[in-house]
Amino acid sequence: MKQIRPDYYDHFSCTADQCPITCCQEWKISVDDHTNNCWKKLAPPTDTIPAKTRLSAYTTFKDGTRVIALDQNHRCPFLSENKLCKLVLEHGDQVLSETCQVFPRETHTFDTHEEQSLMPCCPAVIDLWRNCETLHFPKVSDLCSPAASDALLFSLRSRLIALIQRPDRTPSQALMECFYILRELYHQDNWDTGTLEDYFSEQTLSELHEAVLSAAPALEDTIIEDNEILQDLAVNYQKEGLYQSYLTPVLAQAERLADAYGTAALSDQWKNFNHVWEEFHPLLKNVLANELFSDLLIPGGNLESMIIQMQWLALEYAAVRQSLFLTWLEHGNEKLPYENVRDYLVIIMRMTGYDEDDIYEYLENSFEELVWEWGYFALVVC
Ligand code: SF4
């Protein structure tokens, strides 16, 4: 089957023991059946704690999936002191579960082709994207011949990616415009290539841009909403004691921020933060463009699932920005080091790496309507 992938894909390499936020801790590391069967016959490295006779004895079940049982510090028991994998050192790469071998690569299989991309849950991927001026994604229609209805969705996705990447849009503005177009199409009985050409014509996009600028929600309302979104997304991780070094300070700051709602000082701080945040717009656009390529249109997806994925991306964007706003406040409103931006991107993306069913469940439980009004979307990302 034809495989397609973005231009950056082959440039990734794991930084292993140099990694600042290794994927071998505070995460569900799945162990597939084939690997587990192999592990039933293999002894663990001798210095593994606690000592057990077979590798398979280090697995457990979490949320219905077989995973490696982490130690009391939420680390993989095979992670050595110097942050190398004891299993690889003793048995080679082939002994690893599929998850460990593949991460942070992601593959989606469509009827006509496979799409490969990298996930933003890995700091080396964020470093890679930081050094790319812009990411380039293949156009499906140039390489394969999907059915007409699918071709339309792939074309829509390509146009939305191009909109996100426009240099004359901030990430927030581009997201709001993308969502507006998705909702408009969602409410049309029929749309085709001609409709897309009209929606993405320079004149229509220019009018949409003006309309979005004039409809921006009040600053204070966005600060309040995003604070609550971050707190809500973090609550279960707090209960489990995960990502504490990242979540504890920002959630404490989020509590303090709640007391300052509506004050002029807070609005000024938000405006000042946004000046600092602007420096990272190119990186953010790369992250968003990649997420549109990898997750907006999943196999079997349709316009509604694209809207749901776009809403999820809005929550992720809001949570990343809010956590960095809180970090910036915590550190005296001065600089925002790149390492902070990278680390919170990675952590929030790990926290929100839900599969499609879980995203639907989260949205259904958290919001009155599954498909948001444009005004609410704008409030979240503005
Ligand atoms: S998070 Fe990325 S760079 Fe770090 S150990 Fe995992 S794959 Fe390697």
Image (cartoon, rainbow, N blue to C red):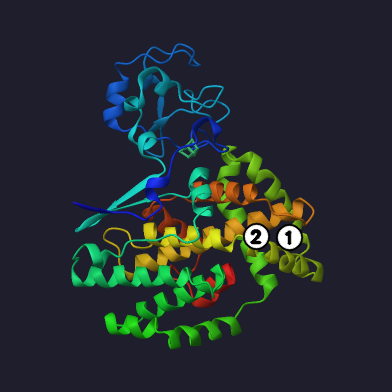
Residue 365 shows in the view: no
Side of 296 where 221 appears, left or right: right
Marks 2/1 in contact by CB < 8 Å: the verdict is yes
Label 2: few (<14), some (14–19) or many (≥20) C-alpha neighbours in 10 Å: many
Amino acid under disc 1: Ala
**Marking on residue 147:** none
Q: Compared with residue 321, is residue 168 higher up or lower down, i.e. above or below?
A: below
Q: What's the residue at 55%, 85% (across, down)?
A: 210
Q: What's the residue at 54%, 58% (across, down)?
A: 283
Residue 25 shows in the view: yes
- Identify the mark nearer the N-term, 2 or 1: 2
Q: Compared with residue 216, is residue 146 higher up or lower down, i.e. above or below?
A: above
Side of 38 where 180 appears, left or right: right
Return the residue at label 1: 258
Q: What's the residue at 61%, 79% (across, down)?
A: 216
Label 1: few (<14), some (14–19) or many (≥20) C-alpha neighbours in 10 Å: few
